[in-house]
Image (spheres, coloured by chain):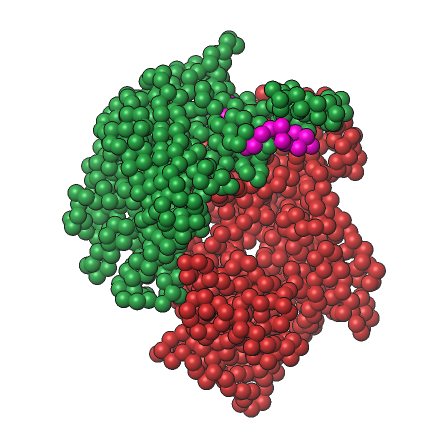
């Protein structure tokens, strides 16, 4: 066996645990390993997990390593030991504060004590140079090289090696930015400079400059991290290539990511949605809502026709309030991000009473340390997990297959204390906590479905994360989602997404022109240019020609609107294809906003291209059928909203359930890393590959 | 009917979410950058008694005025509205804010029974009148400010009244944009109607109405508790509008705040009578300032609804600048007087809750409207407001270059403007030495300048704080005054007043310098190290460091000369 590449391995570093999932290619058997994360040295957790995996296996058996990391996010949030380096920014004379003033709003309107997020470039390190490009791309003032030399001398003196350059209207003409990058290469060899037009060639200067600055500031940290990781892997004897999940849901080779780290900020959350998309496809479901409820937050995303919904811009390290990002609280990065809505409802989220007698949840979370009160790790505050425990939905003795003891009386004490403040008994309080958590989570599910014009009745809910399968039923009822899919290892499902992801490289160019004034040839040139770039990167990543796929898109809007809709284009681009795209735009506008204005002028704003390197999809183990009727391991009272409230509910071990088994709700299914709760009126079927399918029983 | 706390909580969340979703629908399908990018709009739901139950996506100036617009707008139509009807209005003496704010109100029925209203208010880029953008700095009557729309059934049984639409189209400069935005306003109300109905289908009318009642009571309880925590007493302050746009005299706003147990009263007696310039504030704007101030110094997490307003009483004499009589012009009420109103209120409350009140912020929105005709004959208009410094705070410096208090709209990207309009920008940066010196420095103002590249344009400025600076607090010095400079093509410069309408020619440039925030605490108490940082960052000059802060910095090494600083500070403190 020595030397044969048998496994594809993925490692997902979360705040609490580092999950490793390895897939044996020949039969689809999965190996799951969980080790504690090491926040200050995340690569240690990765190596720890790899080490455990390699016990009794040859390092040569690892064929590839996929990786999701929160290191970029943590650095932007200012985590200790991950401080961002001092960064310099070279820009057009007169405009050095564009990156500070931003869009001039404050993230919290009624907070007289609000603060901007800390500036990534202090004002003294924003260098103005004489140059000016007009909105049509012509040069109004040529680049004053002496200004640049002076700036670079100062940057050298200050010992700064994180650099970005951004000029006004560079999306039209990159010459001046390129010239500066060339001068830096000459004068400061080895120092990388991010040019705004190279990380984001679209208009709107603040967002473009910010993307460049975020990228420049992250390069030293991500570079160091990935090289350390590669070195450590080598020491273990693992020579397999390392791929990193980007925020757009596609993988890229570590070497590529090192130069464009702004693309991996939301690496972790993206892999969960990719996993949901893949599982949906495997089970023949093209329209999927992913619902990931972990220890501190719940996240939702949508997958339509197998494609996860994306936004083309996001603020990294921003604040989330009631499912939405507070605009102005973070750093804009213009790059496709898997579109997620998030709320502070995780297993560890703390419930509390305010002075006016209302029950509130979060945003504070007990996390995994100290964790919920029932963990007996000095956590005294009642959490969602404690509430579920009191309601009989969780095993009252232990979790992690007996590996972790649970103390129900501590949960009861914590919840009772909260109940005293609200004038309710413990059980009633616990039921209220769960109901409020569900109402918060139904909101994020609405944000990603109804609000985008999608009818949830056409979707399958893929529920994962340690707590997702416990809350899925009431949420599906609320949104009238007919079916829930619970993967085999819900607690490690995100890591599985890394094995299913393709390689993506996204490119875009601004055009900003009325459709009837667009020369198709001009668009073809832009597409060709981007395609060449994309293919070059894929080739460098070792992707074979027949595994490459090119997707082309246009961003269109009605003239005068300032938001665009993205539509796909197919085939050789000509005026007919452009017309079809305009038709598709009207249709999409109607679908999302309820009307189309077919007689109004449409404007082509951005031309987009995604170069895809298809990766082989994992095929999962088909489980042997378990002989005989499954037996419940116990029966215990559990609470369900509704007239009967407390119902004697059978409890099953998931391992004992073979394919084809059907159980009527209410029923609770326990396993190592999660608990699935099927409500009355639902039934559970064990489907292919051990997936649980929950459906509403026909009445 | 009595309800459990959880159901109330769930319905409360759903109501707020429904209002938010209205905002999403409005913003997504709107045409003008004013709504889409600058988010100059608000959405709300009301119960069948026209009481505000949930509001979202609000800009502060619509806070409270929404409730007023709905109550006053419906007065003539009580009982005559059917399903699918929507009322449109912008009359400031009914809607409570200036003419560009178009309010659209829709009744919500369930099985033939009126259960509430969905409403939204959005700032339109143009509603006609003497100046492009409909915010003239020198209007002397309401009629010059644009088309006045009393409450009319703009939508009947789901269909837009084409005659009213035609009337509006004929009176505005960019009719397609206005119609596009109105369509988005209709979509927003439809979203609200749908959600409210769904909520009733799920929980039943009685439950939802009881929950609405409870949600309002909850906000009332929390607001009362907040007020009770403030020391009882009478607190007074005045501040001034520097002129009226048509006259040169400063005009006084005076407020007397009485905190008594869990109630708070605001009395504007002593405020100047209404003026014939556009700085009068309709009552809705005055109310909005009161609510904004109160929410900001209490707890912004209290859900905004009718309940929060119950412990508040207001006395604004009719005919004064803060509650004018028709047909006084009011365009600047929303955008300028509203800021001074907050300055005055905060100045009074600084005595009551000193730990919660910053020094004065820039106190203006710096409204710039410009329009003209392009080389190809198409007409264009552009309106923007510009950030400045926020006031120094009891525990931190003010913020540089940010919108303050009653506005929070975004700027338009320079690249977007240069691509569409005959403007070329020369600068957009923070102003050195504009932040008011203090233990905690006021935020710096902004310099923004551009040149007109087409042959002709008309510029309208409506601004403040070019003569009376934003005040400092507890020994802090005032922030820098705002400035408007017109640089002619030949290089000559003219200082423009803060409220004016002037023609521009090709090559003329406008240089806008917005005010800084006031300082908080005495500048001689600012640690020299912080002054040095500001000097290194180019926000404070070496001269100002010595003059204002008594900090002597060695210009070559950029280090604080400790001895020289100590003796200078000693000398300055005895002066």
**Residue B75 percent coordinates (x, y):** 19, 44
Q: Is residue B12 above or below residue A61?
A: above
**In the shown orientation, is residue A157 left or right of residue A421?**
right
Q: Residue furthest bottom?
A: A628
Residue under the point 43% across and 53% down: A452
Colour for chain B in the figure? green
At x 30% / y 67%, what residue is drawn?
B2
Q: Which residues are magenta?
A: B512-531
Residue B265 horizontal side relative to residue A13, left or right: left
Q: What is the x, y in percent for residue B351? A: 45, 37
Q: Nearer the viewer, residue A169 or A2?
A: A169
Q: Is residue B249 left or right of residue A380?
A: left
Q: Assign the C terminus of chain B to one quadrant of the image.
A: top right
The number of discs equals 0
Vertical side of A369 occupied by B123: above or below:
above
Q: Nearer the viewer, residue B61 or A505?
A: B61
In the rendered image of the structure, the colour used to display chain A is red
Determine the residue positioned at 78% across, 67% down.
Answer: A51
> Residue B336: where, in percent of width, then height?
39, 29
* Relative image position of residue A548 (x, y in whole percent): 63, 53
B518 in magenta: yes
């Amino acid at each position: 066996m020595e030397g044969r590449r048998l496994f594809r391995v993925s490692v997902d570093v979360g705040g609490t645990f580092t999950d490793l999932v390895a897939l044996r290619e020949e039969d689809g058997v999965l190996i799951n390993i969980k080790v504690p994360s090491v926040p200050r040295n995340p690569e240690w957790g990765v190596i720890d997990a790899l080490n455990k995996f390699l016990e009794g296996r040859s390092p040569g058996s690892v064929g590839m390593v996929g990786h999701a990391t929160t290191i970029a996010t943590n650095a932007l949030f200012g985590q200790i030991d991950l401080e961002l380096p001092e960064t310099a920014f070279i820009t057009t004379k007169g405009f050095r504060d564009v990156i500070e003033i931003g869009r001039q709003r404050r993230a919290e309107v009624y907070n007289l004590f609000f603060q901007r997020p800390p500036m990534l470039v202090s004002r003294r390190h924003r260098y103005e140079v004489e140059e000016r490009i007009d909105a049509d791309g012509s040069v109004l003032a040529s680049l004053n090289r002496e200004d640049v030399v002076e700036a670079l001398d100062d940057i050298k003196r200050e010992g700064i090696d994180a650099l970005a350059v951004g000029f006004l209207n560079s999306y039209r003409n990159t010459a001046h930015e390129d010239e500066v990058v060339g001068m830096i290469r000459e004068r400061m060899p080895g120092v990388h400079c991010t040019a705004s037009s190279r990380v984001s060639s679209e208009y709107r200067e603040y967002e473009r400059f910010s993307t460049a600055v975020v990228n420049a500031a992250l390069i030293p940290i991500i570079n160091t991290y990935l090289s350390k990781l590669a070195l450590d892997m080598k020491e273990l004897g693992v020579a397999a290539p390392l791929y990193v999940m980007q925020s757009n849901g596609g993988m890229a080779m570590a070497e590529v990511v090192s130069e464009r780290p702004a693309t991996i900020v939301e690496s972790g959350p993206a892999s969960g949605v990719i996993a949901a998309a893949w599982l949906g496809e495997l089970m023949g479901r093209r329209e999927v809502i992913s619902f990931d409820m972990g220890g501190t937050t719940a996240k939702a995303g949508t997958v339509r026709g197998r494609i996860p919904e994306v936004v083309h811009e996001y603020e990294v390290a921003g604040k989330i309030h009631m499912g939405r990002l507070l605009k102005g609280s973070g750093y804009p990065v213009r790059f496709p991000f898997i579109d997620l809505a998030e709320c502070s409802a995780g297993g560890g989220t703390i419930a509390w009473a305010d002075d006016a007698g209302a029950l509130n949840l979060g945003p504070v979370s007990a996390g995994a340390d100290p964790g919920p009160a029932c963990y007996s790790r000095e956590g005294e505050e009642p959490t969602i997990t404690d509430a579920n425990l009191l309601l009989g939905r969780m095993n009252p003795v232990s979790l992690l297959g007996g590996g972790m003891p649970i103390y129900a009386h501590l949960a009861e004490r914590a919840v009772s204390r909260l109940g005293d403040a609200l004038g309710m008994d413990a059980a009633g309080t616990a039921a209220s906590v769960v109901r409020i958590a569900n109402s918060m989570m139904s909101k994020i599910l609405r944000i990603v479905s109804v609000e985008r014009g999608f009818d949830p009745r056409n979707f399958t809910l893929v529920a994962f994360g340690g707590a997702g399968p416990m809350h899925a039923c009431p949420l599906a009822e609320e949104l009238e989602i007919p079916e829930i899919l619970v993967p085999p290892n819900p607690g490690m499902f995100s890591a599985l997404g890394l094995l299913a992801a393709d390689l993506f490289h996204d490119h875009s160019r601004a055009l900003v022109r009325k459709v009837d004034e667009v020369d198709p040839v001009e668009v073809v040139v832009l597409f060709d240019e981007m395609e060449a770039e994309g293919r070059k990167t894929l080739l460098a990543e070792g992707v074979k020609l027949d595994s490459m796929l090119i997707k082309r898109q246009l961003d269109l809007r009605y003239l005068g609107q300032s938001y665009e809709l993205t539509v796909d284009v197919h085939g050789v681009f000509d005026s007919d294809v452009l017309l079809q795209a305009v038709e598709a735009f009207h249709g999409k506008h109607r679908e999302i906003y309820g009307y189309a204005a077919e007689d109004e002028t449409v404007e082509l704003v951005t031309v987009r291209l995604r170069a895809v390197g298809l990766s082989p999809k994992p095929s999962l183990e088909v489980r042997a059928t378990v002989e005989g009727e499954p037996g419940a391991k116990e029966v215990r009272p559990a609470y369900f909203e509704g007239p009967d409230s407390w119902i004697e509910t059978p409890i099953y071990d998931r391992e004992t359930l073979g394919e084809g088994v059907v159980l009527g709700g209410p029923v609770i299914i326990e396993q190592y890393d999660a608990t699935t709760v099927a409500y009355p009126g639902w039934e559970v079927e064990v489907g292919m590959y051990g997936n649980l399918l929950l459906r509403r029983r026909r009445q | 009917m009595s309800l459990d706390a959880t159901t109330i909580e769930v319905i409360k969340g759903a109501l707020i979410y429904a209002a938010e979703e209205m905002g999403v629908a409005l913003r997504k399908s709107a045409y003008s950058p004013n709504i889409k990018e600058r988010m100059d709009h608000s959405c709300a739901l009301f119960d069948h008694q026209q009481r505000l139950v949930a509001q979202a996506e609000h800009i502060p100036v619509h806070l409270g005025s929404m409730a007023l617009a709905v109550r006053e707008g419906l007065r003539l139509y009580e009982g005559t509205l059917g399903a699918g009807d929507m009322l449109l209005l912008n009359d400031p003496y009914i809607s409570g804010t200036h003419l560009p704010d178009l309010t659209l109100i829709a009744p919500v029925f369930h099985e033939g029974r009126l259960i509430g209203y969905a409403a939204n208010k959005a700032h339109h880029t143009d509603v006609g009148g003497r100046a492009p953008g409909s915010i003239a700095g020198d209007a002397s009557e309401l009629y010059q400010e644009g088309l006045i729309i009393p409450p009319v059934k703009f939508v009947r049984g789901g269909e837009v009244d084409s005659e009213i639409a035609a009337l509006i189209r004929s009176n505005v400069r960019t009719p397609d944009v206005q119609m596009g935005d109105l369509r988005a306003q209709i979509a927003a109300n439809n979203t609200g109607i749908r959600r409210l109905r769904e909520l009733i289908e799920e929980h039943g009318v009685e439950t939802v109405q009881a929950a609405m009642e409870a949600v309002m009571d909850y906000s009332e309880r929390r607001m009362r508790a907040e007020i009770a925590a403030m020391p009882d007493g009478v607190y007074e302050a005045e501040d001034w509008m520097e002129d009226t746009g048509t006259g040169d005299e400063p005009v006084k706003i005076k407020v007397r705040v009485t905190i008594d147990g869990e109630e708070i009263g605001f009395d504007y007696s002593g405020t100047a009578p209404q003026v014939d310039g556009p700085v009068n504030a309709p009552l809705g704007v005055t109310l909005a300032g009161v609510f904004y101030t109160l929410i900001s110094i209490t707890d912004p997490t209290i859900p905004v609804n009718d309940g929060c307003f119950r412990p508040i009483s207001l006395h604004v004499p009719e005919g004064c600048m803060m509650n004018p009589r028709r047909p006084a012009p009011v365009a600047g009420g929303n955008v300028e007087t509203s800021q001074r109103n907050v300055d005055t209120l905060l100045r009074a409350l600084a005595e009551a809750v000193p730990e919660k009140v910053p020094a004065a912020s820039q106190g203006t929105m710096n409204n710039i409207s410009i329009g003209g005709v392009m080389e190809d004959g198409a007409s264009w208009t552009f309106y923007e407001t510009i950030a400045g410094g926020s006031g120094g705070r009891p525990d931190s410096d003010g913020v540089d270059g940010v919108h303050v208090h009653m506005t929070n709209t975004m700027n338009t990207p320079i690249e977007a403007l240069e691509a569409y309009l005959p403007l070329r920008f020369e600068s957009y940066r923070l102003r050195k030495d504009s932040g008011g010196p203090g233990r905690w420095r006021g935020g710096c103002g902004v310099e923004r300048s551009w040149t007109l590249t087409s042959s002709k344009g008309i510029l309208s400025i409506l601004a403040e704080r070019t003569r009376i600076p934003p005040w400092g607090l507890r020994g802090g010095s005032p922030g820098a005054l705002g400035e408007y400079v017109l640089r002619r093509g030949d290089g000559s410069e003219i200082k423009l007043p803060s409220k004016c309408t002037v023609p521009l020619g090709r090559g003329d440039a406008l240089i806008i310098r917005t005010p800084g925030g006031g300082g908080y605490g005495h500048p001689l108490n600012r640690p020299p190290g912080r002054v040095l940082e500001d000097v290194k960052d180019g926000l404070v000059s070496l001269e100002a460091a010595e003059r204002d802060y008594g900090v002597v910095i060695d210009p070559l090494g950029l280090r604080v000369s400790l001895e020289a600083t100590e003796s200078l500070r000693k000398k300055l403190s005895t002066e």
